[in-house]
Image: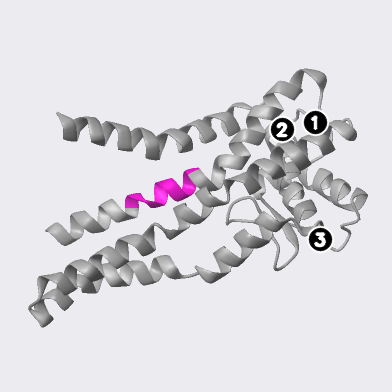
Amino acid sequence: MTIAIFIVVLCIAVFGPAIWVSRVLDRYSVPADRYPGTAADLARRLLDRHGLQSVAVETTDQGDHYDPEARAVRLSEDKFGGRSLTAITVAAHEVGHAVQDRDAYGPLRMRTRLVRATRGIEKIGAGVLMVSPFLGLLSRTPAVGLLTFAAGLVTLGTSAVVHLVTLPTEFNASFARALPMLEEHRILKAVDRPHARRLLTAAALTYVSASLMSLLNIARWIAILRR
């Protein structure tokens, strides 16, 4: 019974945020022509008004994000050319990160360093998990295999930890940057303001929900290694 409860709680913790974020983003993606200009146009206008003419606005298949190294706001295709409340709000959130970068916002700088330092670590973790049983067999010391396996688990969880630790950066981009910009430039329709706050919360949680989902890789590797 205790194991069943633990599994239920774990599923809620892992799937809950991702499901909520997805539902909120989908809900306000209609009507698709809610606003006259596209999200890409809005991002460009907001960047220019905040002295960020050198920051590019690009499409991507890697998910909506701001790349501080390339100095580019990148939007998925549905957002880039989208005119829904979701598209407009997500674009403002990513511009919020660009403004953080301009202002040398400490937590964003810290996250950039953490992401750079841990780049590729998940791949290493997967490799460690794959070789851990063999190391245990070759050394004939179970402890070696267990330690290697534990190292692999920690490595795969790195992404989730990084985004959880730097979550305040996301909320700052949403509510200290994006929302004031949307209000200052009178972008939002009056009836959309409370909905925009929900969307900005969802935008802030996007990375965290994706990182939590990545923890399922750990369960997958455990299942493989137990066969």
Quadrant housing the C terminus? bottom left
Vertical placement of residue 143 versus 166, above or below:
below
Q: Which residue is mark 3?
A: 55
Image disc number at residue 84: 2
Marked residue nearer the N-terminal end (3 or 1)? 1
Compared across the picture, whether 72 is left or right of 24 comes to right
Q: Secondary structure at mark 3?
A: loop
Kindly indicate the quadrant of the structure image that contains residue 184: top right
Q: Nearer the viewer, mark 3 or mark 1?
A: 3
On-image quarter of the N terminus:
top left
| Placement of 145 over or under 208, stated as above or below | below
Look at the numbered discs 1 and 2 and tell me whether their residues touch, using CB distance below 8 Å: yes
Please give the name of the residue rendered at 11% of the width and 71% of the height, measured from the top-left corner.
Answer: 142
Q: Secondary structure beneath disc 1?
A: loop
Residue 214 magenta-highlighted: yes
Looking at the rendered structure, the kind of residue marked 3 is Val
Q: Is residue 47 visible?
A: yes
Q: Is residue 167 left or right of residue 139?
A: right
